[in-house]
Amino acid sequence: MNEFLQIEEEVLRMLRTVFDPEIPVNVYDLGLIYNIDIQDDGVCHITMTLTAPSCPAGDFIVEDIRQKVGSVEGIRDVNVDLVFEPEWNKDMMSEEAKLELGFM
């Protein structure tokens, strides 16, 4: 497997270890991650949202992402851009997340 794909796979694996403390599903499967862009220089740009703009765990979640993704070999810096357009809704969740939360 080429090095870029390995880094990308490891970034996704790390994102699946980040949870909103109030929801038992990771941020990736919740559909909170809108875009992941890994540059050749090792900078990872993540565009994400929260389930609600006033989410009290927002700072915790963003910092957890920075730390965990930043620990991936080949990633030298992580920029997290928090956006609220498009607005998150439950249709953005993976099938597994919907099942876990009882939406299916």
Image (cartoon, rainbow, N blue to C red):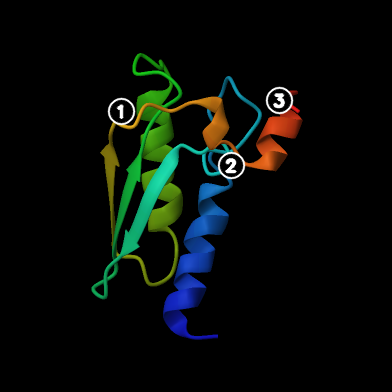
Q: Is residue 64 left or right of residue 17?
A: left
Q: Which residue is mark 1?
A: 84
Q: Amino acid at mark 1?
A: Phe
Where is residue 44? Give x, y as percent. Answer: 31, 59
Image quadrant holding the C terminus, namely top right
Question: Horizontally, is 19 left or right of 82 in the view?
Answer: right
Which amino acid type is shown beneath numbered disc 3?
Answer: Leu
The residue drawn where x is 37% and y is 33% is: 49
Disc on res. 95: none
- Residue 101: image tag: 3
Residue drawn 56% across and 31% down? 91
- Looking at marks 1 and 3 on the same chain, the residue that comes earlier in the sequence is marked by 1
Front one among 40 and 91: 91
Q: Residue at x 68, y 32 (%)?
A: 98
Task: State the image coordinates of residue 62 (x, y, percent, origin top left).
Answer: 37, 36
81 left or right of 20 in image: left
Q: Tell me the distance, in whole angstroms, between the alpha carbons under discs 2 and 1.
A: 17 Å
The amino acid sitting under disc 2 is Asp
How far apart in space, not on screen, are marks 1 and 3 (Cα)? 22 Å
- Circles 2 and 3: CB distance less than 8 Å? no
Note whether 24 is above or below 4 in the view shown. above
Q: Which residue is mark 2?
A: 29
Callout 3: few (<14), some (14-19), or many (20+) C-alpha neighbours within 10 Å? few
Residue 41 is situated, as x and y percent measured from the top left of the image, at 23, 73
Determine whether the residue tagged by mark 1 lies in a helix, strand or loop. loop
Which image quadrant is residue 94 in? top right
Q: Is residue 13 above or below residue 18?
A: below
